[in-house]
Amino acid sequence: MWGFFPLYWPLLKPAGAWEILADRMVWSLAAAVVLLAFQRARRPDALAWIRPLLRQPKRLALIGLAAAVISVNWGMYIWGVNSGHVVETSLGYFINPLVTITFGVLVLKERLRPAQWVAVATGAGAVLVLTLGYGRLPWIALTLALSFATYGLLKKTVALGGLEGFAVETAFLFLPALGYLLWLSASGGSTFTGHGSGHTALLALCGVVTAVPLVAFGAAAVRVPLTTMGLLQYLAPVFQFLLGIAVFHEHMPPERWAGFALVWVALLVLTVDGLRQARKGTDVASGAERDPLTAVGPGVSDMRDPV
């Protein structure tokens, strides 16, 4: 679903990117409220997290910051797609894992394995090649990658569930977005009611389009191995890239192909390294089960007791 988003946003024209973004914020909260009501109907205590959260101003501030950051990501993505930069938006999500790793080093003081250093260095080389190819920094891709990596870092710090976090973030965004839409309507710039019921319905469906893949992701995360999830997440930018080439016929000179090739090499190195580490972890865990007295090496206790 995320991979086919570039086919949806152009359907919302003649609405501009900022009107689409505001509608997405408003209707996303509506979708979140419906999903939370459904959850509460199945589990009476499903909303018990709200009161404790309201007593934690620091955590709320971080969620508000995460909401601001994801709004930058959403707005840039919508604008990029509707301005004919689908391929460059896909680049943003290709390089996002590399930016996330860099944040891990700079912010969380994590230590990288040699293969991860190779991947990050190759990714930096790719950005340089693409800068020369575009004649400018690929700023759309970099904005998307930096904003989404920052959002991921904030989400990790806040440690709130997927649907719960989505609901609170959209609650933060709701009033500014609604105010903008009301101002747009009062000034005669709104397209919500002036282009037929189909256009109105498509704008209102922004919330569902945003929420459904997020909920599906959350459901998959508890059922699918983490290594598989990591590989599956490459599908979205792959589909976006293919749409940019095959459907929107965006120009790809040789130097851009070279830059993308370097990015894909970096991701391949990262993926192979991740699979190797996952296999080592499985082997260590299996060894611990076979002989618990000898399996006392680093990391075994973490695997047996993730809490």
Image (tube, rainbow, N blue to C red):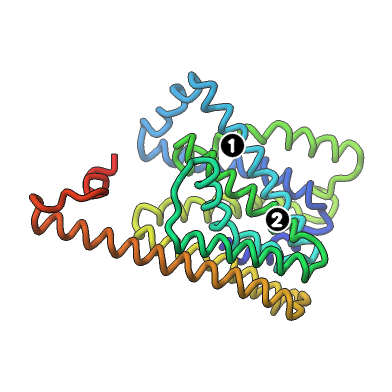
* Image quarter of the N terminus: bottom right
Disc 2: which residue: 77
Q: Residues within 10 Å of mark 2 (few under 14, many from 20)?
A: many
Q: Is residue 37 left or right of residue 188?
A: left
Mark 2 and mark 1 lie on one chain; the one further toward the N terminus is 2
Amino acid type assigned to the residue bearing label 1 in the image: Glu
Q: Residue furthest right?
A: 187
Mark identifier at residue 169 = 1
Q: Quadrant of residue 9?
A: bottom right
Q: Residue furthest front?
A: 114
Please say if the residues under marks 2 and 1 sit with CB atoms less than 8 Å apart. no
Amino acid type assigned to the residue bearing label 2 in the image: Tyr
* Rendered position, 23 above or below 61: below
Q: Position of residue 275 (x, y in %)?
A: 37, 66
* Image quarter of the C terminus: top left
Q: Residue furthest top?
A: 55
Q: Residue at 62% of width from left, 38% of height from top?
A: 67
